[in-house]
Amino acid sequence: MNQNKRLTLETKDSFADRLKTLLFDNKVMIVFALLCYGAFVVSGSQIETVLSEVFTRIARNGFTVLALLIPVFAGMGLNFGIVIGAIAAQIAVFATVYWRFTGFGGMMLAVALATPMAILFGYLVGKLFNKMKGAEMIAGLILGYFADGLYQLLFLVLIGGVIPATDPRFIIDGGMGVKNAIDLTGSLKYTLDRVQIIDLALGLFIIIAVITAGKLILHLRKKRSFEHKDWIIFAVVAVIYGLTYLPAIEKHLFADRVNLIVALPLFLAFVALRNLYHLYRNRKTAMPGFSRTRSIFMIVLAGVVFGLTYVPRLEALIMSVNLPVLPFILIAGLCAFNNGLLNTRLGQNMRTVGQSQTVAAASGIDVDRTRVIAMVLSTVLACWGQLIYLQNIGTFSTYGAHLQIGQFAVAALLVGGASVSKATNKQALIGVTLFHLLFIIAPQAGRELFGDAMVGEYFRVFVSYGVIALSLAMHAWQRKIRKEDPEFPDEVPSKPATALAHKVKEAD
Amino acid sequence: MTGVRKFVNSVGLPRLIIGIFFIALIISGLALGLNPQFLFSDIIRRWLMYSILVLAMVPGVQSGIGLNFGISLGVVSGLVGVVIAMEVAFNGGWFLHLGAAAAWLSLLLALVIAIVIAALVGAAYGLLLNRVKGSEMTVSTYVGFSSIAMMNIVWVILNFKNGQLRWPIGRGLRNTASLQESFGGLLSDPRIYETARSITISPEVSDVGSIKVKQPAGLSFLAIDVADSGFILPLGLILVFALCCLVVWLFFRSKTGVALSAAGENELFTRANGINVDRMRILGTSISTVFGAVGIIIYAQTYGFLQLYNAPLMMGFTAVASILLGGATVTRARISNVIIGTLLFQGILTVALPVANQLVNVSALPEVMRMIISNGIILYALSKTKGGNQR
């Protein structure tokens, strides 16, 4: 019976079967989308306000949700411990604001202060998780609360009590402890959101120039060969930067926001090109996981969506949304980083460790070290995510800003269809969109349905807990079934093995 | 040197540190001039207040589901019981005829409703836990959180009449409902045997609006103010806790209880002996949930207030930390662990507040300490067992 089922899974399925699998695999997302739609209809909210609020929140929280992916690759489950990264960010923000540093420079100082802290914390968390293999999630959750206790001790007692700090703007009147809320207006608020495109172009140019110079030095010292590719990248970036000096282009670049009507076609073009590239690369032999139909479908879809932007009603709607440039570039960068990581040696090691630690250890991978690296990366990314969040929200609630971060990020990721052992950028982005959509609509829907906004408030909290509970339970259930079923042995690292084989083939 | 190490190992490092800390806190508290009668009364009261909730961990751990963070399910069952009992009492005519027994009947009714609900919910929850073997703790934590969040919606929607429960205007139940006019303090507060308590009743039942009843002096042995010194011995609470311990103790000596323990200890061996392990786990979960329900009722009774909404959210963590502090592991727990652990954990928190107030003016300090100690203890225990979830 099982044999048959597996065979049919591996060979060509009928369209109905595949549709069924597609629906089943995305069931959480579909249910959630329907829920959002229902709540939206009930709430009677303005679609323009909802849409622009959703994009604000994606910019605010997207980075943090994406920070959850790396531990999932490494088989460490959903990292509830990202609270600790957020704590590092908050300590740095407090120090920066206390020392009266402002603007973009102040933000860079916060990054410079927070990152080493996050690396240290991530390292310690990773070490601790290595002592608790198999219980990382519960440990991460409790570690988050534990760290919150230490954080409160630091901010309530030690600052002002032991560490000398007297500035009455931040310290409670008695001279001990930090005030409940710190206003970031005029210091760090919008320091990332308000970065102009022209400055980004300069920044990109400088970074590429420095990297090229570094490669050149390595080449001169004969440590690494300098290829044509490197010159071409530099030349392209230089030309792009040169173009920004043309007055016709320059006048557009002083903006810090891009209208969705500009960003959406860019995104669609990216999707279409990416799928075209996939089609081109797989023209002869299909890589595992590649589907010609899907790629063609995506290209057609992108075209259709682009066509839809010319419908006046939709055009007006899309035009009403403005995106802050830098946060979205950072989110895109993190997506690229997550994907790129999987193509490196380290990323492959993480995958293998995630599939089976026994197999990984047998093939000479330092399992513990790989896991620690995954935690360090995740913690640092979460820390940066929290910096993006704080500068956008503009008020730093000293004792509350980090509390729900882990909770909400994990719930958002799961809503996108991710599970404890599998998560992608796409799921993270879809998840954060849907989750925050519900967050925006639920109080209004609660007021309309029950005459009480609190119902909606409580409902969204219930949903965020419930989604996590359900996903964890379903994952554990499936794992148990697989364990009891000899047809599906637990420790077969099928994916990384084939992926690795493919890489080897490519290298030849 | 080896003697010291042996001693430390036998007592357990966390117990030793916390125990020394506890004693040091008591000494410094007394040195700072705190009233010893009040201090020790408070310690005993808090100890017994939480002890049944902690006791609820024992059947869960023994049956093999690990630390039952999902005790929140029992807690909300208990809260539902109390809320229903109070509303029934408010609307019921029998209140007028019962006099002083009315408060006792409310308590009994709350317990009965809560136990029935908890047993059913616990059995369903046990079924779920059987399907997620190996990840019980993560799942149960979130099941617990979800149940609290779900009940928040229920509390805000419920349209009750009892003025103690509902907001004066609008709909929904209060965050904190006083039990002063119900069963609050029956087992632990000597004052209620001296002054009459007024009990309000629905105007639809009687136009009197409220009746005054005095608890019979014959029951005053339940809460003794020892030699009128201010040191209160809550004998009623002690008796209830002792009764619960006895029930658990007897249960684990019965045939079923032994089978249940065995199921938690070695699943394969137990199964080979023809015992239905899954059923034992369901039973253990159910009993654990029932004790959670009883525990929260006794807690509310002692505290004098019923806390709804998010107040019980972290109660599971407190209970788990207490029993771990008492020397239990993820797989084995005894009644003695409950008694020692709750004393140390609650004792420290009780003494910390007045001592901290004398030293620094930070009112949130005990709460911060609770977070650090409870979560630190749980982390320590998890790291000791190489992560609890693995077998």
Image (cartoon, coloured by chain):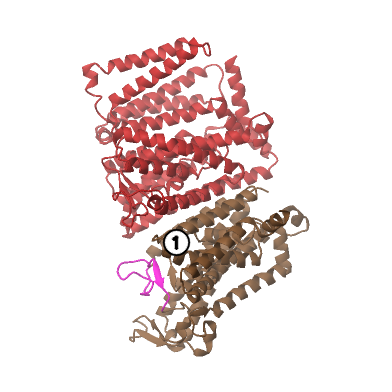
Magenta extent: B159-180
Note whether A64 is above or below B252 in the view shown.
Answer: above
Name the main secondary structure of what is drawn in magenta. Answer: loop
Note whether A29 is above or below A148 in the view shown.
Answer: above
Residue A287 falls left or right of residue A399: right
Residue B172 lies within the magenta run: yes
Residue in the picture at 57% in, 51% down: B379
Q: Position of residue B268 (x, y in %)?
A: 74, 52
Colour chain A appears in? red
Residue B283 lies within the magenta run: no
Is residue A17 visible in the rendered image? The answer is no
Residue A437 falls left or right of residue A222: left
Residue in the picture at 40% in, 68% down: B176
Label 1: how many Cα within 10 Å (few below 14, some 14–19, many 20+): many
Residue that numbered label 1 is attached to: B151
Is residue A97 visible in the rendered image? The answer is yes
Q: Position of residue A77 (x, y in %)?
A: 55, 42
Depth order, front residue of A277/A305: A277
Numbered circles on residues, count: 1
For numbered disc 1, what is the local secondary structure? Answer: helix
Q: Amino acid at mark 1?
A: Met
Depth order, front residue of A177/B276: A177
Q: Chain in brown?
A: B
Note whether B214 is above or below A149 in the view shown.
Answer: below
Chain on which label 1 sits? B
Residue that sits furthest to the right in the current view:
B273
